[in-house]
Amino acid sequence: MEQLQHMDKLAQEKHTHLEQQTIEYLLHLLKDQGVDNFVANGVGMILGPGINIKRDPRNGRNFEYLSEDPFLSGELGSSFVLGVQSCGVASCVKHFAVNNQEMIIDLFIRDMKDQLLDQIQKCLQLGK
């Protein structure tokens, strides 16, 4: 059985190339297990990466997100997207802005752009 680092750990170490390689490796492992054609088996898209920032430690979705740092989330998120797309599968970046806090969301437009929208834009620009 293979043991790979969690994406959260890769984010802490800032190894974007390792994240892309890890995603590619995982997809190739799945193909080796008999899932040789994702589209033929009904899998045309992977729901990820989750690139919201971790604003509140009580957020139940923090395990999905890559980092507290918006820049790093964008870097790692785009590496994730490129890794998935290199295997012929689409990637759905999630969750769109301001989905990382459940209640009392007071956020200025500038903060939203700086903290939430830049990483989404980066993933969209680098993806195919």
Image (spheres, rainbow, N blue to C red):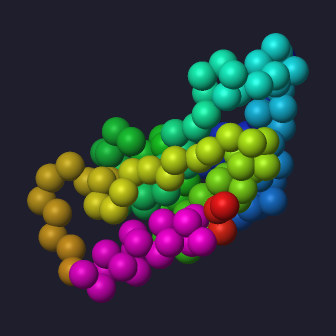
> What residue sits 64% from the left and 62% below the top?
127
For residue 119, say whether it is visible: no
**Residue 122 inside the magenta-drawn segment:** yes
Q: Where residue 12 sits in the image (x, y, percent)?
A: 65, 58
> What residue sits 58% from the left and 65% below the top?
123
Q: Is residue 44 left or right of residue 21?
A: left
**Residue 21 inside the magenta-drawn segment:** no
What residue occupies the far front of the structure in this picture? 40
Please give the count of numbered marks on the rendered protein.
0
Q: Where residue 38 sits in the image (x, y, percent)?
A: 70, 27
Q: Is the stretch drawn in magenta largely helix, strand or loop?
A: helix
Give the magenta range.
109-125
Residue 30's quadrant in the figure? top right
Q: Where residue 14 sits in the image (x, y, percent)?
A: 71, 64
- 41 w.r.t. 69: above or below: above
What residue occupies the far left of the structure in this picture? 104
Q: Where residue 60 sits in the image (x, y, percent)?
A: 34, 39
- Which one is in front, 116 or 63? 116
- Which one is in front, 57 or 89? 89
